[in-house]
Image (cartoon, rainbow, N blue to C red):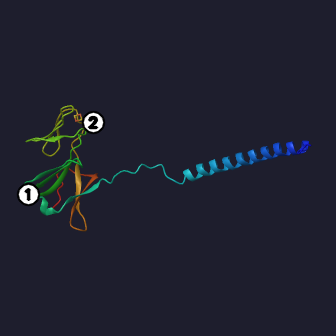
Amino acid sequence: MFDKTPDEGDMSRRGFLSLASMGAVILSFLASLGGILRFTKPNVYYEESKRFKIGKPENFPIGIVKTMEDKNVFIFSENEGLHAISRVCTHLGCLVSLTGTGFDCPCHGSKFDRNGKVIAGPAPRNLPWLKISRNIDGTLVVDAAKDVKMGTTFRV
Ligand code: FES
């Protein structure tokens, strides 16, 4: 009449507990492995390169000022050569605009002369001049991560 003996019920309970403990061991092993593998990946935020091409030298005839809106840089072409000045105000990072005599910051009123030197306002430093170089393909490259001394020009 009885299909199961009392021991079979115990066995299945034992089997279940054995399976559950094995599952817990496997899960904890996988969690540990995941944690270990996570350490193989560095905690680095990748950001866009600060070097960017601005075009061929012939695109910058003497006397021209180009505003690179997307890169926040002004490019000046003068008799002495090219130079790049950052548009980012050294106070709190607003974008300065070009005026007839220099640059104005719309946020808190800092003013800079034509070389980016602070003449008024809360800005603590001059606008940085950025390094210009020529790529191997002949295009000009601005490196917004490298400041150069004010007055440094790139001879084309
Ligand atoms: S951000 Fe330019 S003056 Fe404050």
Viewer-closest of 11 and 60: 11
Give the side of residue 127 with respect to residue 3, left or right: left
Q: Secondary structure at mark 2?
A: loop
The answer, for residue 119, to whether it is visible in the render is yes
Q: Residue at x 87, y 45 (%)?
A: 8
In the image, residue 122 above or below residue 142: above
Disc 1 crowd, CA 10 A, few/some/many (<14, 14-19, 20+): some
Between 120 and 9, the one lying in front of the other is: 9
x%, y% of residue 156? 15, 63
Mark 2 C-beta to ligand 1 under 8 Å: yes
Q: Amino acid at mark 1?
A: Ile
Three-letter amino acid code at disc 2?
Leu
Q: Which residue is mark 2?
A: 92
Q: Residue furthest bottom?
A: 137
Q: What residue did someone put label 1 on?
A: 62
Q: Classify the position of ligand 1 by quadrant: top left, top right, bottom left or bottom right.
A: top left
Q: Position of residue 83 (x, y in %)?
A: 17, 54
- Split into 4 quadrants, where in the image is the N terminus? top right
Comparing 87 with 48, the one in front is 48
Judge from the rendering whether residue 72 lies leftward or rightward of residue 26; answer left or right: left
Looking at the image, residue 132 lies above or below residue 19:
below
Choose between 27 and 65: the one closer to the eye.
27
Q: CA distance from mark 2 to mark 1?
A: 32 Å
Residue 57 x, y percent position in the rendering: 15, 62
Q: Secondary structure at mark 1?
A: loop
The crowding category of the residue bearing disc 2, from other C-alpha atoms within 10 Å (few below 14, some 14 to 19, many at least 20), is few
Where is residue 36 drawn, in percent x and y?
A: 59, 51
Up/down of 136 relative to 67, above or below: below
